[in-house]
Image (spheres, helix red, strand yellow):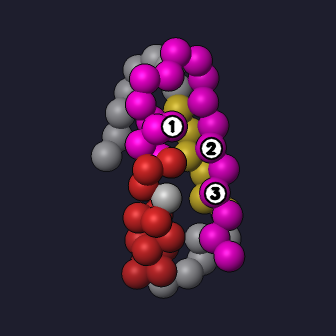
Amino acid sequence: MLAEGFPPLVVAVQNAQVPVAQLAEFLLARLPQLREFLGEQREFGFIFLRVE
């Protein structure tokens, strides 16, 4: 998904050099947090996630 416009929102994932299935599981486990972050924000946003 690509969304353009204001405000700019960035989701950064560190240590994403893992199998796709593991990355998908990691992101799905954080789906509530990501939905809240990508929801109705009025300012620039940056969320940093680290795959462990």
Q: Which residue is mark 3?
A: 49
Picture coordinates of residue 23 (x, y %)?
A: 48, 73
Picture coordinates of residue 38 (x, y %)?
A: 45, 35
Q: Which residue is mark 1?
A: 37
For label 2, the SS is strand
Q: How many marks?
A: 3
Q: Residues within 10 Å of mark 1 (few under 14, many from 20)?
A: some
Picture coordinates of residue 49 (x, y %)?
A: 63, 57
Q: Amino acid at mark 3?
A: Leu
Q: Which residues are magenta?
A: 34-52
- Tell me which corner region of the image, top left, top right, bottom left or bottom right, holds residue 28: bottom left
The answer to whether the residue labelled 2 contacts the one labelled 3, judged by CB atoms less than 8 Å apart, is yes
Q: Nearer the viewer, residue 15 or 30?
A: 30
| C-alpha span from label 1 to label 3 | 12 Å
Q: Residues within 10 Å of mark 2 (few under 14, many from 20)?
A: few
For label 1, the SS is helix
Q: Residues within 10 Å of mark 3 (few under 14, many from 20)?
A: some
Q: Amino acid at mark 2?
A: Ile
Q: Which residue is mark 2?
A: 47
